[in-house]
Image (cartoon, grey):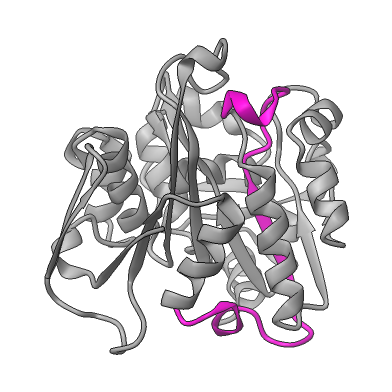
Amino acid sequence: MKRREFFIKSAVAGLGTAAYLKFGNNFDLFANTKTAPDNIYDLVAIKGGEADVMFNRAINSLGGMKRFVKPNQTVVVKPNIGWDVSPERAGNTNPKLVKQIVKECFDAGAKDVYVFDNTCDNWTKCYKNSGIENAVKEAKGKLVSGANESYYQEIAIPNGKRLKEAKVHELVLNSDVFINVPILKNHGGAKLTVAMKNLMGVVWDRGYWHRNDLHQCIADYATLRQPDLNVVDAYYVMKRNGPRGVSEADVVTMKSQLISTDMVAVDAAAAKLFGFDPNDIDHIVYANQMNVGTMDLTKLKIDRISL
């Protein structure tokens, strides 16, 4: 079912409207069973290059961008642009990565590529000082505000346990392809921000999640529908004081990236890269139990690339 059809039907129904991988010092993955075609991997872990170079190499292991974006489709790209900080502070997604993803979408034949986030700091300053505004303009994409409630439509979450409905940005509802591009970083409430947590930026009332079991709400929203592609930026990684950070002293340079269609898998791999056991991150465990994806990396065919 197409994304647009899925959300429209959800709204109407609910509301009336074996490779052992050792990656750096922290990233230990075991891949045994193949679930993808022989020439396509389930998850790609790449390190050692610039963000745009790593993405180009990694997306080929997933079948290329044309596997996800067809001619004349509209695409929405959701990076983390939540904070009024420079790229080196690692509060937001690497602008060089965002630019390359937008460019690759157009090269695959996309009609329009939109980029937005429901920011925490002033949205105009976040867009500008993150470097993402210029990056999107240079790639000919369209940067859109997420700062007005009128942009959001109320959608039912039938399988949610605590989060039963949410106001979702119209771009996510109306675009053909949804590409989720979080940055990996520490978070005081959720322990980590990765793919599933990044989706708080597509809803209007993120405060409800914080007040009503944040981990369960993150997992609940993930049951609604997975993004078509998840690209985890781990070039600069904020190891403490997240989600905003205090200074560049909070940041380590890892020059890494993780890509998968499975949010749970990519979050589990990111947790390992960060230095956590995925079993200690409640929303990863909950989403796995709710069959959103798998946190058992031994079931995946993983391509490990070192540049």
User: Residue at the location (61% across, 57% down)?
Assistant: 52
Residue 305 in the image: state x and y as whole percent.
35, 62
Would residue 147 be found to the left or right of residue 278 on screen?
A: right
Q: Give above or below for 186 relative to 154.
A: above
User: Residue at the location (68% across, 49% down)?
Assistant: 96
Determine which quarter of the picture holds residue 76.
bottom right
Which of 59/198 is in front?
A: 59
Q: Give above or below for 176 relative to 181.
A: below
Residue 80 visible in the snapshot: yes
Would residue 169 be found to the left or right of residue 282 on screen?
A: right
43 part of magenta stretch: no
Determine which quarter of the picture holds residue 204.
top right
Quadrant for the C terminus, please: bottom left
Residue 86 in the image: state x and y as whole percent.
70, 26
User: Residue at the location (83% across, 33% down)?
Assistant: 128
User: Residue at the location (74% across, 67% down)?
Assistant: 103
Residue 17 visible in the snapshot: no
Image: magenta residue range: 62-90
64 part of magenta stretch: yes
Q: Give above or below for 103 relative to 52.
A: below
**How many marks are shown on the rendered structure?**
0
Quadrant for the N terminus, please: bottom right
Residue 60 in the image: state x and y as whole percent.
48, 77
Which of 143/158 is in front?
A: 143
Give the residue at the far front of this rendering.
307
Residue 151 in the image: state x and y as whole percent.
81, 48
